[in-house]
Amino acid sequence: MTSATEDQSLPSYDASTVGPVQLLATHAVIERKDTVLLSIKPPAISTRSPLRVVCVVDLSGSMDDTVSLKTEAGDKETDGLTLLDLVKHAVKTVVASLGEDDFLSIVSFSDDSKVEFEMTRMDAEGRRNVSDVMESLETTGSTNIWAGLDDALDVIAAGPNNSNGAVSAILLFTDGQPNIRPPPGEVAMLQTRKNKKFHGELPCIINTFGFGYNLDSQLLNSLAHLGNGSFNFIPDAGFVGTVFVDAAANLLASALKRITVKIEPLGGAQIQVLRGDSSIFGNHHVEVVDEASSAADGGVIVTLGSVQSGPLSKDLIVQVGRLPTNVRAEYLKVTLSYISLGRGIEREDPTVRSIVVSARKGGDESVDRVAGQWARLLMVEKVMEGFALAEKGEFDAANGLVKELAGDLKKVWTQLTPGDDKKHLKELLVDVEGQVVEALMAEYFHRWGKHYLLSLLNAHRLQQCNNFKDPGVQVYQSPLFESLRDEINEIFIKLPPPKPSGSRFSYYRSSSSASLSAVTAAAPVDMSRYNNRNGVCFSGDCLATLADNTTVPVKSLQKGSRVLTLDQRHTAKIHCMVITKLANKPTTRLVRLQNSGLVITPYHPVKVGSSWAFPCTLPDAQEYKGDCEAVYSAILSEMECIDGDRCECGKKVEFGPSLFVNGVECAALGHGMGEDQVDESVIGHEYFACREKVLGDAVNGSGYAGGLVECDGVWRRKVGESSLIDGMIIV
C-alpha cells in the first residue's frame, strides 16, 4: 500500500480543472524482478495553458533547398517551397494559435546567432509583428546550433516576469549537422549551462526538429533528452504538418511542468540503476540523490519536464532488489515536485507530495497496468540495444533481438485481461513488427532508420503522440490534446500559404550526395499536402475481384454483386456500398501500395500473409497525391464456399468479412473479426468491426434500398484517454 506522508496545499485551479494531482504506486513481479509502477496523474483540464516559447530557426544555406513530394508514379513534385518556407509556415501556425496570454520570441542561427524578435506578448500587434519578422528571414552561412540554443536559453531566462503558469519551451529547427561547434560539444555545453547558470534545472523544455536525412540525429536527440523534451524526425515535406501540429498540441495540452521524482530505497532495498548510474528502466535519465554513496542504495532523482492534461498519466518503472523480508515493510519513499500550469497562477511555487510504498503484488492500480507499462519501456530498452547493434553493422543481430522482443510482448499480451492495457500493447506490437523491423535493416538504417527510431523511442518514453502514422503512439492523446491538434491543424491548412522561394528546377539532396533533379512545379500551393490526415476506405478506381475471378472498378460494384472473400475459396454478396466523396475533404490521407497499386486510406486493415496490418506501416506504402474523387467501403452478406456441397472448410460465418481489391485482401465494413486475435489492434474495432452498428447507420441513408449510401464523416465520442469513432455520418 501507499500512504501520504506530506502534502502541501495544492494551488487553486480554474473552473475547468477537476481534482488534484495523484501520485500512485503499484507492485508486480515481472521476470522474477520486483517491479514498481509510479504514476503521476494530473487533473483533467479543458482549457490550455499559456505558452512562452522561443523558436530557433536554422538559416544555413541548405535551408534554401527546395522540398519535394512524391507523386503516384514515384516522381518528385515541388510547389517551389524551400525548407525555410515550410519552417516559416509552421512558426506562423503557432503564432496564429496564440493569444494575449502567450509570449513568443524568434532566434536565428547560421555562422552565429541573432535574436530576431524579442519575447513579446502575442496580442494582435505582436502576432502581426512577428509574422513580418518571419517573412523577412533569409538563408546565409553555416550551421552553428549551439549559438542559437545558447541565445534562446538567455531569452527564456530573461522573462517576462508576468507569465506565471505558462509552459516554457524552445523549439529548434534544423536540416543538418553543425559545422561550427564549441570545443566541448553542444551537449557538454548545455550540461554546463544547466549546472552553473540554472543550478541544475533548465528553465524550459527543449524540443528539436530534424528535416531530411542529412542529420546529426543523435545530437538533436541528446539535446532534447537533456532538455526533457522530444526529438522529432521529419523525413519529407509530407510530414511537416503532422509532426509540428502534434508537437504544438503536446505543449499546449500540458498541465504540469518542472516535474521531479525523488525515489529513495528504505529498509535495505536497492534500486536497479542502468548505464553507470545514469538511468532507470526505460532510459529515463537520473541523478544520484545528494550525499548518497550510490544510486542503488541512496536513491535517484528523475526529471520529467512537463506532462499532458489528464486522464493521461506519466509513468515510471522502478525495479527494486533486496526487498525487506517483512512483507508489510516499507521499501520505497517517493517524493513528487511539480508546478501547476494555467491562467491566473500568481506564484510558481513547487508543490511537493510524498508517499511510502509497501505494496506487494498490487497497490493503487492493477497489476495489468504495471505489466503494460513495463512492456512499453521494455520496447524502449530493447530497441535501443538493437540501434547500438545496427550502428556497428550487426543488422542480423539487431533484427533477431527485435523479433525476440516481439515474442516477449506477445507473451505479456496473452496474460492481460481485456481492456485498455491489452489494446495499447497490441498497438505497440504493430510498431515493433512493422517500421521498427524495417528501420533496422541494412538498406534503410543509415538513410532514415536511425533518425526514425530515435524519434519513435522518444515518443514512447515520453508518452507523447508525435505523428499520425505510428499506431503505437496514437494512445498518448488526452481529450484536450485532440481538441488542440484539430484546431492547430485547421490553422496550418487555412493560413495563407507561403510564397515559394525555390526555383522551378532545383538541386535535390539525397542521403549520399547532392544531385541535380528536374522536379515538376505544381501550383497553386495547397498546405494540406504537407499535413496528411487519415480516413477509412479505398479508391473507387481500384479493381475488385468478382466471384468468377474477373475484376471491375470498385465504384462499379452494386448491390447483389458477388465478390471473392476470405481465403479466395469463398464468395459474398455486396449488401451495400458506402461512398465518401473527397471534393470537400482536403485533409483525407491516402497511401498507395507500390507492389499492387492499391490506393487506400492509411488505417483501413489489409491482410499481409496471415496477419492484418495498417497500409501505412507496410514497406511499399507511399503517400498518394493523385486524383481521387471518392473512396468506398463495402458491407457484405451471404457468404458461400465455392466448393458448394463439397465444402469441408467449416466456415460458418453468414456474411463475408473481406474483399480483394487490386489483389489485396481488405476488411469489409462490419466484418466481425478481431476479438482475442494477436492483431486485434489492427483488425478489431468497436465500431467498424461491428456489423450491427455499421448496418444501424447505413439503413438511415437515402440510398440504402438501392445499395449505395453516402458517408460525410464520422461521429466521435470521448472515452477516457481517447476519442473513439462511434458512427458514420450518413446523408
Image: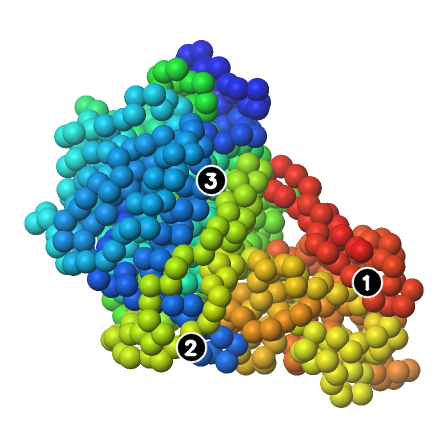
Q: At 50% from the left edge and 80% from the top edge, which residue is drawn?
A: 73
Q: Nearer the viewer, mark 2 or mark 1?
A: 2
Q: Amino acid at mark 2?
A: Thr
Residue where numbered disc 1 is placed = 709
Confirm whether residue 116 shows in the render.
Answer: yes
Mark nearer the N terminus (3 vs 1): 3
Image location (x, y in percent) of residue 210: 32, 56
Query: Disc 3 marks which amino acid?
Result: Ser
In the displayed structure, 18 sits above or below 532; it is above
- The residue lying at 58 percent from left, 79 percent from top is 597
**In which quadrant of the rendered image does the C terminus lie?**
bottom right
Q: Nearer the viewer, residue 15 or 276?
A: 15
Residue lying furthest left = 183
Q: Residue at x 58, y 66 (%)?
A: 590
Along the polypeptide, which appears first: circle 2 or circle 1? Answer: 2
Residue 274 lies left or right of residue 316; in this view the side is: left
Return the x and y of residue 43 as percentages of the image width and height: 53, 26
Q: Secondary structure at mark 3?
A: loop
Mark 1 element type: strand
Q: Nearer the viewer, residue 11 or 389?
A: 11
**Pointer 2 residue:** 520
Residue found at the very far top of the displayed protein: 9
CA neighbours of label 3 inside 10 A, class few (<14), some (14 to 19), many (20+)? some
